Image (tube, rainbow, N blue to C red):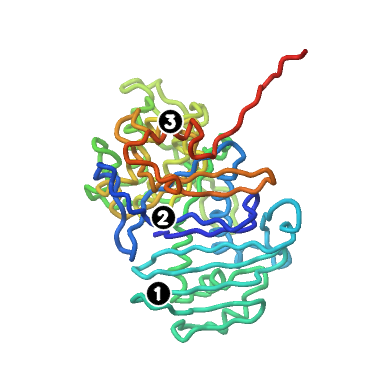
Amino acid sequence: MLIEFRLENHRSVQDEQVLTMEAGRIGTDGDPRLRVIQGHSEPLLPVAAVYGANASGKSNVVSGIEFMRNAVVHSHRAWPPEGGVPRDPFAWGIKSQEPSLFEVTFVNGEIRYQYGFVADDDRFLEEWLHAWPHGRKQVLFEREGDNFKFGEHLHGENKLVEQVTRPNALFLSAAAQNRHDQLTPLYGWFRQVRVANLGVRRRTVQDVSETWLSRSMTPVPTTEQQELSATAPVADDRIGALRALLQAADVGIVDLKVSVEEDDGSSVRARRARRVRLFLQHQAGNDDAWLPLEEESQGTLTLVRLAPHILETLWTGGVLVVDELEASLHPLLGLHIVRQFNDSKLNPKNAQLVFTTHDTNLLGTTLGEAPLRRDQIWLAEKDESGTSRIYPLTDYKPRKEENLERGYLQGRYGAIPFLGEIAPVKE
């Protein structure tokens, strides 16, 4: 479970910014579904929403999480040895030449960990991993340049991994690729962080969903707690799960089917390549009412693009980070997704959702009970120098009965655009 993400010198985030999932002391706002996650010294939140004007920097927080995740998962195996570190620092001024910092605090296996690194364009300058078993701090390893220090509680082939860790690769990434028993589960935590950018092209949408279906047709757990909604059937495989989600979303889809195409062409690995195509049915009992995925509306494509991330995260209990949750989705559908993560019956593995959005319906009661606690709401804004900052809504201490949607749109909490005339009248 994610506790905190810390970021400095990444894109428009020039100074250190912190996003925390620790719950505030505000109660449940009268709705027991707006619950917190136990299992940490402080209760954690299953959902956090980041609001802000266009170009305020909220998407750069998502980008920072994605970069950190990719550095852990791919730097040792996939980054070119002489390629440096593909970071994206603040674009101008002295900060563009300074290092970037990424740090995450999380719970894995009931133990709290803090992991982070500092990098410039050429290499990782620092890297550290600390643990708190039984509430007492342990230094597992610390890296400064080419110098590594290993704590007495980190067992395994540490020196061997040190020798194969390149300057532009992370020790944690190299340790997992070399089967370090103690560190591989922490690498696995990062693999369960899924990032979805919904402003994508149709081809990307099609590739993601169809690749996900082709990867495995094996059953997943079929407990009552994994129902996709109060009325959706229990999912017994990926196809069934996707079918249930689309039906629950009420986008006019009544069924789906997949066509598996085998390619017997030459292959170095001497195996048959599989190509899965997805077809959606729009009218029950009508054999002509099937459309291939690529001919669907943008809203349906967005939902199908997001569905694998939602399902896998709810099944495994990971972290899902979504940029622009409302992109081409009806407000009620966005509300439905948020409530899935907030509801302990639909989210028994304590999966977490972090998303950016402009959808102010999630702040008020227009669609029913407010789906977000006051401490689940974050705001992003950019100052005159182009520097972004994020801050929690609770900094403004809004009252329990306060209309958050109205207050936000009126600029009471900041993080909104200041609009001039789009087409000024000529004199």
Marks 1 and 2, how far apart in space?
A: 18 Å
Which residue position holds label 3? 406
Give percent across and percent down for residue 81.
Answer: 70, 67
Marks 2 and 3, how far apart in space?
A: 25 Å
Q: Do the residues labelled 3 and 1 touch (CB within 8 Å)?
A: no
Give percent across and percent down for residue 262.
Answer: 49, 44
Q: Do the residues labelled 2 and 3 touch (CB within 8 Å)?
A: no
Q: Which of marks 1 and 2 is nearer the N terminus?
A: 2
Q: In front of the other: label 2 or label 3? A: 3
Which residue position holds label 2? 21
Residue type (three-letter) at the residue carrying disc 1: Trp
- Seen at 51% across and 68% down, the residue is 115
Marks 3 and 1, how far apart in space?
A: 42 Å
Relative vertical location of residue 315 with respect to residue 97 in this rendering, above or below? above
Which residue position holds label 1? 132
The answer to which image quadrant residue 396 occupies is top left
